[in-house]
Image: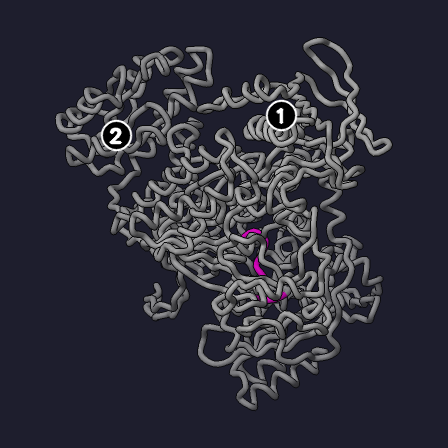
């Protein structure tokens, strides 16, 4: 029989207000095996921990039950306290009477009764607990960054700076991401490329960084410290190590009608292309969807023109397999398509553009070489209407998103200001629901747009945009003066909501990382662990976790890097002893467990057994590698014969808890 | 067919290709068939039987037989071949130690169906394509339409194709369109109360003889949880007549995704409980949620419950159905 001590925490009034903690302690004292029981105001405080330690020593406790907050909060605290006085830390069980009890019940009688039952369940489990000893696993000292935008670049640079090797996997032919497409950045209005390209070059030059451009993640296996990743290097039909990036092929390619994604499809590129002048790596890529040679086998102009013979039409996708200790997700975002919002006539008129398209129209490397011209007739627009919150803060979320995209208020102010600065003869209207400018020098920036640049800010939404006789008839409401407005605009710019990159969903599955309903990656804790995913060893950087601007993205990128460095600097990770194990005498060798194991921790071998009738038999049985097993328990439920069980969470322990609750 | 089978078995025994034969022999009565192992031509001549009553699925016996010295000849019907292939997939049999002769099957006769027609004292059975004729101790020759006296699993046959064999005796059949899920759909259409009453009525008759488990080709665990003292469910005395339902529910879960729907459980049940409907419900659900899957149809594909694919339906959909269906 175990000698169990029960410790009931008040958590100030968090628990004590809806649970009669004294009664809980008294009732649990009556349970078999309980030799000590106490309640205390803050069990996690030093004096609370001392109470536990003293009781362990004084009453020679072999098991401890702490009725307190979620084990996610203080399980470690109490395990360490127990270990410090010689009790195996895995003899400590937490009964969560806060999150799962006091916080959700209003009635004290109900709360108290439930707390007693939860305590009983934990006591029933401790009776079956056995001391466990954690193993260790080595750490592969290399990090993987998925996504080569500013978030990924910054994370990679910081990790490399600390002396660790980093691989960046970027799905497009160049790193740089969305920031490379921006013209100027708020609130300082410095040129986006001017501050981004030095970082791109630095990443390319940094010896510790390896860039896999035009590549995607195929498969992720393993666990924190020991990930094994398959990277698909898509065939770019150009030998990356030979191509000099001279660009001759991109001028001679006869296939001229390929929409240029870098300029949001507002001009064309060739079938062989380099996305933009400062691309890293500066290597040409053949677009297989448009290349005549790849489609019909007739052309070969680029191959003939290439001075270094870098073109290879027979190139195939290549799979690179590498090991990593940590993975950073930096998959970024996309603006949503406003096509679903019929009222803004985006699909009807080329003069209705998204903000990112407007960004390209203002940019010197854009389709108009930086002169603001209407896409329809190439004339200078005189009246421009900006519409904010297109798809953001949508109620039904059928067409749009329920969240605030956070960056639109600021970039719209930027666009309005830059337009007025360059073309003082334009009238600029901005329709908004709220103008949100929290951030250093942000509100000042917005006020400058209003006060110095005389941008017409109007609170209200645009109801309808109708293309008519070369104009865009904009109907809108001014909510402050309560009047209907009719504006004949030359251009309408839609501040479309941002959404996570579509590649994030399948990546999350590969990483077993969790996502919220909007497909943003979730953090391990929204406040206290904002750059870690709940999956150990997977970290988050940039927009993939939620809307944020460049300064925030860069800060988060560096924070993620700090977490990665903290992990990689360790030589060994202390494992979790709560791992699966197989009872060979019960194992049928059916392989169900091997199939469901997400970590590849289970192997099979033929072993000789002495059978009850004194014969020997060769049987196929499963074995678990405890260093690889993460204790998820999938195998224990897949096993038909009950041969698989989990240390610390055995079927018997869980059944004992259920029995205690149902008593 | 019986003569052809015996002849072939003798040949293989004589050639030394196998050293024993797994087949069927008659027990006390002609309809009282039992699987048996034959080691000589004499035994085969004397006891080997194959007729409309030889319904037993032989695959499960190969778990043990295939581990013994030398090769065993097994005659497998289409149903048995699915079960056998599923056992290969689960590494429960040694394929190399079994020589399989596939035999076509046009359905087996349910003695209970004959008895229900007032036929008793059967001494012999003959079958044609669509009729069976029995001789009785009363010197009767009674002919009935085959369709009327087949097992339910044969009426709703899912496949007449032997999916794995070393040779076929006779023509191999094809996978057939089956209405086997109609009975499940009928249960699904009931209200939860009606359905509960249905199963209460059926399962309360269970005497826990374990015949269903013992015959089930998916139940080949080294040690069944119901025999394992540490499982917490071993030898539990039923508190009321409906408590054996848990035995059947646990069993249905254990074979989910592995059950080939051979129908042996219902065939051997002395209380005539339609146990196979529990398994069929699982099969139907899996087909609908994860795409068509037939356990035992091959040795490579992963059963849906231990597989993961990007387009698996979300758990919420499974839960939702659980609440509605």
Between A218 and A409, the one lying in front of the other is A409
| Left or right of B293 on screen, residue B40 | left
Query: Which residue range is magenta in the image?
Result: B298-306
Q: Is residue B193 visible?
A: no
Q: Please, which colouring scheme is shown?
A: one colour
Q: Give the crowd class for mark 1: few <14, some 14-19, many >=20 residues within 10 Å.
A: some
Marks 1 and 2, the one that precedes in the sequence: 2
Quadrant in the rendering for residue B82: bottom right
Which type of secondary structure does the marked residue at label 2 adopt?
A: helix
**Secondary structure mostly seen in the magenta stretch:** loop
Residue bearing mark 2: A78
Q: Position of residue A72 (x, y in %)?
A: 36, 31
Q: Is label 1 or label 2 in front?
A: 1
Residue bearing mark 1: A393
Q: Residue furthest bottom?
A: B15
Is residue A557 magenta-colored? Answer: no
């Amino acid at each position: 029989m175990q000698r169990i001590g029960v410790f009931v925490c008040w958590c100030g009034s968090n628990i004590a207000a809806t649970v009669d903690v004294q009664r809980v302690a008294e009732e649990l004292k009556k349970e078999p095996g309980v030799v000590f029981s106490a309640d205390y105001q803050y069990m996690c405080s030093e004096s609370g921990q001392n109470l536990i330690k003293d009781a362990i020593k004084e009453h020679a406790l072999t098991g401890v039950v702490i009725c307190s907050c979620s084990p996610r909060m203080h399980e470690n605290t109490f395990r360490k306290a127990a270990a410090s006085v010689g009790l195996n830390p895995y003899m400590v069980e937490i009964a969560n009477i806060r999150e799962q009890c006091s916080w959700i019940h209003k009635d004290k009688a109900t709360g108290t009764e439930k707390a007693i039952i939860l305590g009983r369940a934990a006591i029933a489990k401790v009776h079956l607990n056995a001391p466990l000893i954690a193993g260790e696993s080595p750490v592969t000292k290399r990090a993987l960054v998925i996504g080569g935008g500013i978030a990924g670049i910054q994370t990679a640079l910081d990790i490399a700076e600390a002396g660790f090797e980093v691989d960046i996997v970027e799905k497009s032919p160049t790193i740089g991401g969305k920031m490379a497409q921006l013209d100027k950045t708020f609130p300082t209005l410095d040129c986006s490329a001017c501050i981004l390209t030095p970082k791109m070059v630095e990443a390319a030059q940094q010896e510790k960084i390896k860039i896999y451009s035009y590549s995607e993640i195929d498969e992720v296996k393993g666990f924190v410290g020991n990930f094994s990743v398959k990277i698909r290097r898509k065939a770019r039909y150009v030998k990356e190590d030979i191509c000099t990036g001279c660009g001759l092929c991109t001028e001679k390619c006869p296939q001229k009608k390929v929409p240029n994604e870098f300029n949001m499809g507002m001009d064309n590129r060739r079938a062989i292309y380099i996305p933009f002048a400062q691309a890293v790596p500066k290597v040409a890529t053949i677009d297989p969807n448009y290349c005549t040679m790849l489609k019909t086998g007739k052309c070969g102009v680029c191959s003939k023109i290439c001075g270094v013979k870098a073109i290879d039409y027979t190139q195939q996708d290549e799979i690179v397999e590498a090991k990593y200790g940590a993975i950073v997700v930096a998959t970024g975002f996309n603006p949503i398509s406003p096509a679903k919002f019929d009222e803004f006539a985006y699909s009807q008129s080329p003069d209705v553009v998204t903000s990112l398209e407007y960004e390209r129209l203002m940019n010197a490397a854009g389709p108009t070489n930086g002169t603001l011209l209407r896409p329809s007739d190439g004339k200078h627009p005189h009246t421009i209407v900006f519409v904010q919150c297109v798809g953001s803060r949508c109620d039904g979320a059928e067409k749009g998103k329920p969240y605030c995209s956070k960056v639109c208020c600021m970039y719209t102010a930027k666009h309005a200001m830059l337009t007025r600065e360059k073309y003082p003869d334009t009238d600029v209207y901005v329709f908004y629901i709220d103008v949100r400018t929290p951030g250093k020098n942000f509100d000042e920036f917005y006020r400058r747009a209003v006060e110095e640049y005389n941008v017409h800010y109007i609170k209200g939404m645009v109801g309808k945009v109708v293309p008519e006789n070369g104009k865009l008839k904009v109907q809108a409401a001014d909510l402050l003066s309560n009047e209907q407005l009719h504006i004949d605009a030359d251009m309408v710019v839609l501040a479309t909501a941002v959404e996570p990159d579509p590649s994030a969903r399948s990546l999350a599955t590969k990483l077993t990382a969790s996502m919220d309903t909007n497909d943003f990656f979730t953090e391990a804790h929204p406040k206290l662990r904002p750059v870690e995913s709940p999956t150990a060893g997977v970290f988050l950087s940039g927009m993939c976790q939620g809307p944020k601007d460049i300064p925030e993205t860069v800060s988060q990128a560096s924070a993620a890097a700090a977490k990665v460095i903290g992990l990689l600097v360790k030589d060994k990770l202390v494992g979790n002893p709560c791992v699966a194990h197989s009872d060979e005498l019960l194992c049928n060798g059916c392989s169900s467990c091997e199939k469901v194991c997400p970590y590849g921790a289970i192997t099979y071998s033929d072993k000789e057994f002495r059978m009850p009738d004194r014969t020997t038999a060769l049987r196929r049985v499963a074995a678990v590698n405890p260093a690889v097993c993460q204790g998820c328990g999938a195998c224990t439920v897949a096993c038909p014969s009950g041969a698989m069980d989990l240390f610390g969470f055995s079927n018997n322990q869980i059944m004992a808890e259920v029995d205690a609750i149902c008593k | 067919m019986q003569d052809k089978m015996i002849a072939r078995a003798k040949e293989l025994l004589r050639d030394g290709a196998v050293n024993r034969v797994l087949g069927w022999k008659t027990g006390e009565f002609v309809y009282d068939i039992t699987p048996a192992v034959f080691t000589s031509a004499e035994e085969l001549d004397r006891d080997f039987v194959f007729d409309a009553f030889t319904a037993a699925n032989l695959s499960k016996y190969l778990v043990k037989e295939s581990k013994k010295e030398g090769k065993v000849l097994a005659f497998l019907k289409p149903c048995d071949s699915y079960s056998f292939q599923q056992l290969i997939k689960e590494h429960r049999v040694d394929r190399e130690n079994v020589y399989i002769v596939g035999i076509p099957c046009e359905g087996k006769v349910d003695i209970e169906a004959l008895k229900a027609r007032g036929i008793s004292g059967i001494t012999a059975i003959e079958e044609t394509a669509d009729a069976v004729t029995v001789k009785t101790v009363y010197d009767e020759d009674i002919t009935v339409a085959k369709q009327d006296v087949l097992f339910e699993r044969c009426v709703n046959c899912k496949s007449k194709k032997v999916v794995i064999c070393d040779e076929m005796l006779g023509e191999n059949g094809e996978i057939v369109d089956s209405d086997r899920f109609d009975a499940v759909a009928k249960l699904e259409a009931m209200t939860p109360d009606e359905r509960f009453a249905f199963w209460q009525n059926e399962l309360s008759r269970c005497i826990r003889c374990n015949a269903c488990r013992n015959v089930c080709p998916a139940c080949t665990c080294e040690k069944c949880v119901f025999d394992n003292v540490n499982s917490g469910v071993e030898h539990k005395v039923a508190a009321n007549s409906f408590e054996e339902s848990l035995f059947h529910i646990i069993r249905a879960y254990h074979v989910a995704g592995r059950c080939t729907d051979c129908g042996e459980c219902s065939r051997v049940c002395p209380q005539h409980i339609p146990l196979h409907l529990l398994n069929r419900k699982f099969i139907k659900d899996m087909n609908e949620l994860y795409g068509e899957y037939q356990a035992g149809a091959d040795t490579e594909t992963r059963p849906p419950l231990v597989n993961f694919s990007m387009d698996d339906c979300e758990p919420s959909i499974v839960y939702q159905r659980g609440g509605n269906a």
